[in-house]
Image (cartoon, rainbow, N blue to C red):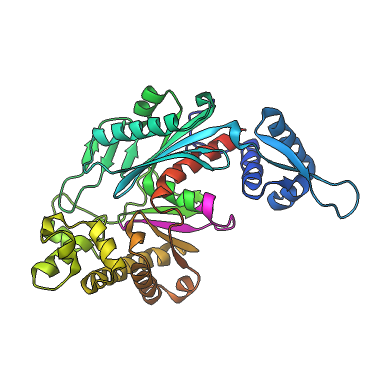
Amino acid sequence: MIKQMLLKDRILTDKERKNLAILEVIRKNGPISRTDISKITELNIVTVSNYVNHYIKKGLVVEGELDESTGGRKPVLVELNPKSGYIVGVGLNMLSTVGVLVDLEINVISELKQERIPENSERVIENMVEIASEVIQKADIDRAKIVGVGVGVPGIIDERGRTIRWPQSLGEKDLSVCLSIKDTFEKHLNIPTFVENDANAAVLGEKWLGLDRDVRHMLYMFSGVGCGILINGEIYRGATGASGELGIMSPKASKEYAREITTQLGRWEMDLGMVDKARVRIEAGEASALKDFVQGDLSNLSFKEIVRGVKEKDNLTLKVVDEAGIELGKKIAFLVNLLNPEIVVIGGGIEDCGAPLLDAIKTSVKEWSVEEAASQVKTIPSAFGENAVALGVVGIVAREVFAQA
């Protein structure tokens, strides 16, 4: 059983750092020789051999085929034993809730996606537990080998106070839910559970599972309302875990003023305000296929229709998406100037708008960033889409398993 303490809560010991470095290289590059592990990690070959032999005894790593030799005895290759453990990840997205069960090589064994419950309440947490339970039941595995559950949710998580504070729509008071996600999951599943903010989970997932290991500084823009920050290869959470909330809001501010400053310092809607802007323009008389998509009832207009409008090249939709991309690009440019990242990932759902949104963001970032930062940064869509949060929290648990190996 792994210790129920995330890497974020403590300083890694020398042994844990070596465990993490060696096992990450084996996961990403296996089958691989001990010599090559030594070269990549810059740990001496004796240390690498001792650690790998320990993993083999535990069943975490297995020896396989022989590598080609340039002379002398052929080196034995090692790789992870993916069936030595399993991890469950559940992520809450803009439109959906995703549950996955993976092995230690992060191969997906079972998966479940459902439309997100249209509310922020304790019922949402209960639904996430149900999804986790279902993906476990769907997988034909030994339940005793499940080493942990990762849960990714929006908002500010205070495990000490056992609360979650969800940012609400513009001009509305934030909602606090007095329910410990960790306790709820562990009570129902009897498996160690780790909870992380959605944007933080997503930024680690993109780095750990998708991108080159040399990327050290990265931002993950989660639908324009949150930001996962990676500095020197580690998630930056701030003093109280509240970093990355993208936008300011005062309970004294009117809804009108809150909406007025959304594209500046204010808090944005999950869809960058695209649905509201499209609705206003259609009501003002502009023609659009969006109206047909909802049979003339604009109260039913949602982000799904915006994505469909982009795919069908509806002119009004493309204008709205372009404007949103330009405004988001300005906010990103501010962060690029402040933090000078190598990569900015666009995710959380808005990346479904495709090239029209991404191109507008790139143009705006280039225009509004200082030249030295703009020339370095790459802006890309999420590699994992709606699975990013679920796989991100899986990565957090996997790193903990590896560190404690």
| Coordinates of residue 198 in the picture (x, y in percent) | 37, 46
Let me know if residue 267 appears in the view.
no
* Whether residue 209 is situated above or below residue 352 in the rendered picture: above
* Whether residue 341 is situated above or below residue 227 in the rendered picture: below
Q: Residue furthest left?
A: 284
Residue lying at 13% horizontally and 73% vertically, measured from the top left: 286
| Coordinates of residue 22 in the picture (x, y in percent) | 66, 43
Residue lying at 52% horizontally and 54% vertically, measured from the top left: 210
Count of numbered labels shown in the rendering: 0
* Whether residue 325 is situated above or below residue 172 in the rendered picture: below
Query: Taking 238 as reference, is 247 left or right?
Result: left
Residue lying at 74% horizontally and 34% vertically, measured from the top left: 53
Q: Residue furthest right?
A: 72
Image quarter in which the C terminus is found: top right
Viewer-closest of 226 and 28: 28
Magenta segment: does it hold 214?
yes
The image quadrant that residue 213 belongs to is bottom right
Magenta segment: does it hold 183?
no
| Coordinates of residue 312 in the picture (x, y in percent) | 28, 68
Query: Taking 300 as reference, is 216 left or right?
Result: right
| Coordinates of residue 327 in the picture (x, y in percent) | 28, 68
The residue stretch that appears in magenta: 207-224
Image quarter in which the N terminus is found: top right
Let me know if residue 83 appears in the view.
yes
